[in-house]
Amino acid sequence: MEFIQEQFLFYLSLIVVMFVPGFFLLTTIFQKKRFSQIEALVFSITLSIISVDFLMIVMGKMGIPLNFWSVLSGIALFSAGCFFIQKNVQKKNFSFEFKKTDNFSKNQTILIVLILFLAIFVRTAHLKNAIFPTATDLGHHMYWSKLITETGELPVYEKQEIEKVGESYQVSEPSPIADFIIGEHLIFAAISLLSGVGFVTYFPTIILFLVNIAGILTVFVFTLRLFENDSEKPTSFSKNVAIATLLFLGPLYAISSPQSTFVSGGVVGNMIGNLLIPSALYFYFKALKENDSWSLFTGIFLTAGMIYTHHLSSFIFIYIFAFIFITFNILFIFNSVWFSKKKRDAKKLFKDYSPVVTAWVKMIFSKNVFPLIIAFLLFFFFVFTPAYIETSAVDTAIGAPSKSTRAGLSLTEIKFNIGESRMLLATLGVLIILLSHAKKKDDTNTIYSSAFALGWFVAIFSMITIPETLHLNLPSGRIASYFVFPASVLAGFSLTWIFWFIKITKRKLMLPASIISAFFFALFVFVLVNGMFDNSESFENKKNYQEANRVYHASKYLAGNPNLSESDIVLKDHNYLKADTWMKIFFMRDYNFPFSRSYFKRYEDPTKPREMCTLWMISNPTTTQGEQCFEETGVNFLVVNPKNDTVQFKNANQFNKIYSGNEIVIYYRKN
């Protein structure tokens, strides 16, 4: 009965936190017949995440304790406020209805349902061996989320470290951390506060799983809107492109980053960022296409939320936005000049361009958008400035690459990252779009579609191939995880265009139907085999439940030991202990507590010299250096794997074994 109650509260809290506030906000901003059911669902999730983040930040800054009642009341009041505006403030009679213009055919609907089923099935098959909380990154993030639930306050991102001062070593005072952003943790804290579910459970992985599914559905609806303006193609073309894109993001390449691998790895910022980026692009595109200031309002709101959620995603989004702007201008100028009788008629170009700029300016300075921009700037500078701004983390992301992992990827590495068939078709999609603009004069909406599709793709491609030219000092592999979505969009477009082009030109080609069918079959098999092979290569079959569970048991034992005082210092090993980063959640004393012996290669990294005490105290505890480290840092508990670290402690009289297991032992060092 207790399990059923826990499950009920958990899923109810998911609805309350990740759907209700966003749905009420969406239906307040936009009037009837503006979204399909899928759009309403995914954007309710996206807007809910951002709304809850801002609600909790405001409550925290106002000194309101963050607990069950405050979070529930905040969401209820926010939703009620939106409902009140709908019924009493809107000038027109308000009623939100789903638009009916996206009715898919029976075959298309069956295909979408089948693809979504396979997408969830493949991910679930992978995550069944990874649902147990062991991921290193997730352990780091859940420390901060749990800290919020325990203190009822917004976290201060600080940590203590063992540092070398002159010839001695000591535990430092807390110092700022730039690697974490508050929006990554508030949504987990809110769900835990409402449901009562602990953090060393299944729930963080389920949240990331839902975010991943919402992300691919967002790309699906964005693609649907992106290619629906072409008058030369049938109305079903954009729907087929969206379905093909869903295929590339759903069951195909479903395991590799940033998909299930990032879900099981607990890469919170990237997962949420890959939801927010296409969501923001959708509303910016909608604003420009329909000259709609409320869509621009929503796009800016999501961008503001992104800034408080993940600095890397925000940084990449700036580049995407800049490349879209540049691409639009290049295509617009080309379109105006190339098809003009007077190739150098500057007056005509100005005449064509002037209404576009005027529309942009009117939307930016409209009564809907401009107050939001001012409110965000005031909030950013005077209410809550993200930690990565205060610690100047942005400065380290700009400049020449400082490591080989930041020097860019080769085409072979990119192909390996996103899949051979997807890369090939995406590249072909770029060429098709460019050639289509050289053949006919396009309207502004068509240019917007091309600019968003190409700008998104080219921006990230440039960031991972020529980072030095763009003055980027960021991990190229991590940026490449953002390349999957735009590559899938262009691959879906290319695949659909090939089928459409052959269909309308098969009479001119004078090829037998059998040859055309064989070509279709070969292309489709190539795509499916390549995508599913990538899945099979990425599957994780190893089960780590027992090993991790023993680490949790030992952590609980040590954290609850009455002889462990605030002055005692614990050092653990990160090389051979499974899920060791989750140990800090049992102690909740500091982000770096227990201290860790890091990976051995990091102590040899000449680009980033490290203190050596955490290595010596486990690897060489009885040497002069090890003894000095123990005396100066105060470390007196050691947590190691007995299969790799026992010999150096067995014959040392100053160490007593106080906990013993097959994969973990704890030693106490006598003073």
Image (cartoon, rainbow, N blue to C red):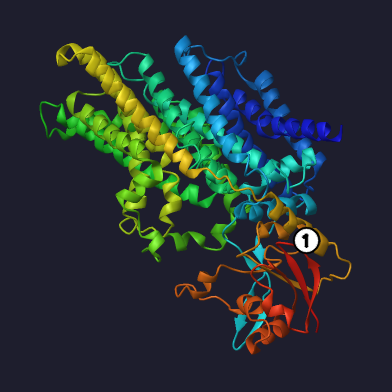
Residue 78, how many percent across, how many down? Answer: 71, 32
Residue 498 appearing in the image: yes
Q: Residue at x 15, y 26 (%)?
A: 339
Residue 211 appears in which quarter of the rendering? top right
Count of marks, rendered view: 1
Taking depth in this image into account, of 257 and 145 the one nearest to the observer is: 257
Residue 565, how many percent across, how many down? Answer: 84, 71
Residue 134, how many percent across, how many down? Answer: 65, 52
Q: Residue at x 70, y 62 (%)?
A: 663
The quarter in which the C terminus is drawn is bottom right
Within 10 angstroms of label 1, few (less than 14), some, or many (20 or more) residues?
Answer: many
Residue 515, how many percent across, how many down? Answer: 22, 18
Q: Secondary structure at mark 1?
A: helix
Whether residue 616 is situated above or below residue 11 in the rendered picture = below
* Residue 494 as seen in the image, left or right of residue 144: left
Look at mark 1 in the image and give the residue it sits on.
554
